[in-house]
Image: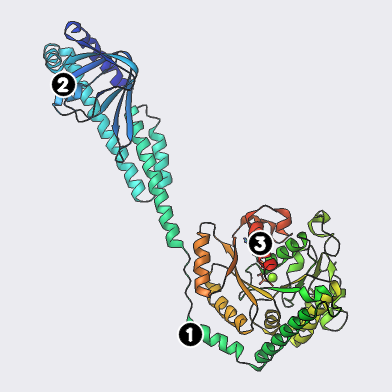
């Protein structure tokens, strides 16, 4: 109620009070309803003691308080004057006593008292003016909401609350909750629209796969990989009879690959390797991205402290194990508690000349394969994690072919969809025993279960994990191993699922 209305109501109350003799006393218990909205208006009331609450309902049927009245306040004149049903309901807040004046006595008093009739007219006029201002506010809010300017609507709603008017406040509260609901519904719809849907051009996919697989090199690779697997199976069968080192038999080669660059391969490789080492395994991680090496950065290695690299082995300058650097005392500032020799890094050279030579001359990919085996053997590894160069060139195909487990990393990005399908097909033709997809940089607003199901259907390949797009990963900016900095982070937990898969497969 505004001040003006309060004054007028006090005046009406005073005028009507002279009719004391013809007024009845009404006692209300706490919560007792005096009348409901829609009831016929047959009397006028003054609060003698206690409080009453005037309320109506919003469009969802929720109660909306318009006003709370106290001793001396008058109400109910509107229905008497316009002969319409009650416009709001009234309930006692605690025990209340009211004075009731019936319709005829009230109207007679209005006729005989110029002061009362003027006060009633003033009250109605005041109300009309307020109604106009409510309509203006409502018009403004409706327009802002319709145009989607929710923040402006909220601001305007807040400013209306400075006007001391209970009825306006009630309307503003109702509109405010409406704005919230509309906004949430719109956001939910927007997310639905943003749901990822992948489409593959099957004809292009077939052509692309054929171009890669219908070459002599590829056919040789398939044969070679097959022989290697058969040899490994034979070794396993002979284990126990001959003195073959257990590591050589059980060691697994894990390749982390993607069709496009920048999907997160190096970050995933480094974190998977460290998590495996933290689980007590002996791990090597090798950067076969000789053209654009990267993983060394995560291990704090730079041009000055790199020492021997994979390139030195490939050019016959050293044995491969000499290019393997024990990182167990260096990662996580040496405070990880990792056992010595539990994690080795085999970096690629950062020197421009070395990189140019690889691009110019290429290298013997067969040597790479021998190197992998020598590493496992010499260092007694349980796992060798290969961080690859993106795409499907010869050395990448070799890494894929000799992997026990291949993880193909994809982003929820149109650029990755088609190439990932080709990579999956090529890996199948190379008979990789265990093939999984990793979805990295997924918006947290996606429904991960739905995304996993959709991707698995499209590629007919299990998804090992979905790693959310994370500002924390971006902030670390490859300046360390994320798992060691944020062990309980959702990204670290998502990577742990990859490690679970690695440990669960053959
Ligand atoms: N889940 C993630 N959320 C946010 N940023 C990420 C996430 N994963 C990786 N990145 C960022 O993406 C960039 C590329 O990561 P990374 O170097 O590991 O990819 P890559 O596939 O090895 O790239 P390249 O193909 O160039 O070798 C880095 O800046 C990294 O911090
Ligand atoms: Mg990389």
User: Does the residue tagged 1 have its C-beta within 8 Å of any atom of ligand 1?
Assistant: no
Q: Which residue is label 1 attached to?
A: 203
Q: Quadrant of ligand 2?
A: bottom right
Q: Identify whether 138 is placed above or below 51.
A: below
Q: Residue furthest front?
A: 241
Residue at image position (65%, 78%) is: 433
Task: Give residue 481's mark.
Answer: none
CA gap between label 1 and label 3 equals 34 Å
Q: Given this view, does label 3 or label 2 mark the residue nearer the observer?
A: 3
Depth order, front residue of 457/306: 457
Quarter of the image where the C terminus is located: bottom right
Q: Earlier in the sequence, mark 1 or mark 2?
A: 2
Residue 2 percent coordinates (x, y): 32, 23
Q: How is the image coloured?
A: rainbow
Residue at image position (54%, 57%) is: 444
Quarter of the image where the N terminus is located: top left
Residue at image position (66%, 56%) is: 475
CA gap between label 1 and label 2 equals 81 Å
Q: Which residue is label 3 attached to?
A: 495
Q: Earlier in the sequence, mark 1 or mark 3?
A: 1
User: Does the residue tagged 2 have its C-beta within 8 Å of any atom of ligand 1?
Assistant: no
Q: Secondary structure at mark 2?
A: loop
Residue 346 percent coordinates (x, y): 80, 72
Looking at the image, residue 483 sits to the left or right of residue 302; the answer is left
Q: Secondary structure at mark 1?
A: helix
Task: Give residue 42's mark.
Answer: 2
Residue 451 percent coordinates (x, y): 51, 64
Quarter occupied by residue 500? bottom right
Q: Identify whether 279 is placed above or below 122.
A: below
Q: Given this view, does label 1 or label 3 mark the residue nearer the observer?
A: 3
Label 1 Cα neighbours within 10 Å, binned few <14 / some 14-19 / many ≥20: few
Q: Identify whether 324 is placed above or below 82.
A: below
């Amino acid at each position: 109620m505004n001040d003006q209305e309060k004054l007028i109501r006090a005046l009406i109350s005073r005028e009507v009070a002279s009719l004391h003799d013809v007024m009845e006393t009404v006692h209300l218990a706490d919560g007792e309803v005096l009348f409901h909205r829609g009831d016929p208006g047959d009397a006028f009331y003054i609060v003698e003691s206690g409080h009453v609450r005037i309320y109506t309902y919003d469009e969802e049927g929720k109660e909306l308080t318009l006003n709370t009245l106290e001793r001396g306040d008058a109400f109910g004149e509107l229905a008497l004057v316009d002969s319409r049903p009650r416009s709001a309901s009234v309930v006692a807040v605690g025990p209340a006593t009211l004075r009731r004046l019936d319709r005829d006595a009230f109207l007679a008093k209005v006729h005989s008292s110029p002061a009362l009739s003027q006060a009633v007219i003033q009250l109605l006029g005041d109300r009309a003016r307020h109604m106009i201002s409510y309509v203006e506010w409502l018009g403004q809010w409706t327009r802002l909401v319709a145009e989607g300017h929710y923040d402006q609507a909220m601001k305007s709603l807040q400013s209306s609350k400075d006007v001391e008017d209970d009825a306006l406040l009630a309307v503003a509260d109702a509109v405010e909750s409406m704005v919230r609901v509309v906004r949430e519904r719109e956001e939910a719809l927007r997310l639905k629209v943003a749901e990822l849907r992948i489409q593959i051009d099957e004809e292009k996919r077939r052509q692309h796969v054929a171009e890669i697989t219908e070459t002599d090199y590829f056919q040789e690779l398939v044969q070679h990989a097959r022989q290697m697997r058969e040899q490994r199976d034979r070794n396993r069968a002979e284990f126990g009879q001959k003195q073959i080192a257990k590591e050589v038999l059980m060691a697994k080669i894990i390749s982390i690959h993607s069709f496009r660059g920048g999907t997160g391969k190096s970050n995933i490789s480094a974190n998977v390797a460290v998590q495996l080492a933290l689980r007590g395994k002996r791990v090597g991680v090798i950067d076969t991205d000789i053209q654009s090496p990267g993983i060394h950065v995560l291990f704090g290695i730079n041009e000055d402290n790199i020492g021997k690299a994979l390139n030195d082995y490939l050019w016959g300058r050293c044995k491969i194990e000499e290019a393997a650097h024990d990182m167990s005392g260096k990662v996580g500032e040496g405070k990880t508690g990792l056992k010595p020799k539990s994690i080795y890094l085999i970096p690629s050279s950062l020197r421009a000349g070395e990189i140019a030579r690889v691009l110019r001359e290429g290298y013997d990919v067969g040597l790479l394969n021998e190197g992998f085996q020598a590493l496992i053997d010499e260092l007694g590894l349980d796992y060798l994690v290969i961080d690859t160069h993106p795409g499907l060139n010869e050395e990448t195909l070799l890494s894929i072919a000799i992997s026990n487990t291949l993880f193909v990393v994809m982003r929820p990005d149109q650029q990755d969809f088609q190439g990932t399908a080709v990579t999956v097909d090529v890996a199948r033709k190379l008979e990789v025993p265990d093939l999984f997809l990793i979805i990295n940089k997924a918006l947290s607003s996606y429904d991960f279960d739905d995304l996993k199901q959709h991707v698995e259907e499209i590629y007919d390949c299990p998804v090992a994990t979905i790693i959310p797009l994370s500002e924390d990963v971006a902030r670390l900016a490859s300046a360390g191993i994320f798992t060691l900095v944020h062990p309980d982070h959702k990204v670290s937990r998502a990577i742990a699922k990859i490690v679970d898969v690695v440990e669960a497969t053959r």
